[in-house]
Amino acid sequence: MSSIKIECVLLENCRCGESPVWEEASNSLLFVDIPAKKVCRWDSLSKQVQRVTTDASVSSVVLRQSGGYVTTIGTKFCALNWEDQSTTVLATVDKDKKNNRFNDGKVDPAGRYFAGNRRSVYRLEKEEQIPDGMCIDADGKLWVACYNGGRVIRLDPETGKRLQTVKLPVDKTTSCCFGGKDYSEMYVTCARDGIDPEGLIRQPKAGGIFKITGLGVKGIPPYPYAG
């Protein structure tokens, strides 16, 4: 296995970065900042980032087979047109529940967009680490970002055995995805909210986007929403 390298490719200062997804056609990484109500697209070639502001907390973004993107904004599934920065509501859930919102979302191999507004919390180790966003590699193994754990871990989904641990220089790692030319790079989002001033001095790159190379495994392209 080649040596692992970790670098912060974008100092975005996300309050809570989430839902990273690689768009091969544009060599770009998309992600959201939930409380800042932003969908971001970072161009890995130009190193420039573009942002679209939404009218409510945006918790996930996915590619759309017919073009553009789909996001979960508040309790709505919305189509996002990047060119004119417009959103179109596709569906709304939980209209009768105030102060509710989607928490995360992914597309399955059949092209269906699943999103949830609740999660179970598990204690992984002695430290209070919460399993957060995850992705799968080409070998069928899970990579899980550990919130408050400052790491991503590789797990065998059949046995539950931990196969690999990669520590990052920030505590609140939130999610991960594979990307790059051959999906051999891993991108990790993290959060800045909830870190006290002393903590921010120790981890000045909190809220940034990190790239990990040299893992020795590759990912698979993200599934687009078929609708």
Image: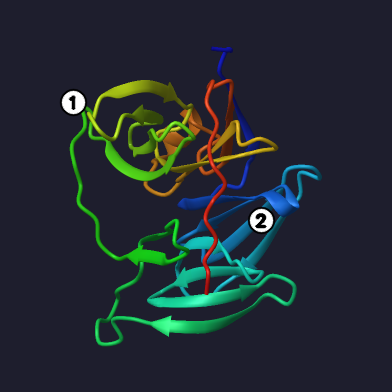
Residue position marked by numbered label 1 in the rendering: 126
- Dot 2 falls on a residue whose secondary structure is strand
Position of 217 relative to 140 (above/below):
above
Residue at 55% of width from left, 61% of height from top? 224
Q: Residue at x 52, y 66 (%)?
A: 225
Which residue corresponds to the image point at 53% horizontal and 69% vertical from the top-left?
226
Quadrant in the rendering for residue 101: bottom left
Q: Position of residue 173 (x, y in %)?
A: 42, 39
- Viewer-closest of 192 and 176: 176
Mark 2 or mark 1: whose residue is earlier in sequence: 2
SS label for mark 1: loop
Q: Quadrant where the N terminus lies?
A: top right
- Measuring from the top left, give residue 81's x and y in whole percent: 66, 74
Packing grade of label 2 (10 A; few <14, some 14-19, many >=20) is many
From the viewer's perspective, tell me whether residue 144 is left or right of residue 83.
Answer: left
- Residue occupied by mark 2: 41
The CA span between labels 2 and 1 is 36 Å
Q: Is residue 159 left or right of residue 73?
A: left
Mark 1: amino acid: Lys
* Residue 143 falls left or right of residue 41: left
Q: How is the image coloured?
A: rainbow
User: Which percent across, then down, holds residue 42?
Assistant: 68, 50
Q: Nearer the viewer, mark 2 or mark 1?
A: 2
Q: Amino acid at mark 2?
A: Arg
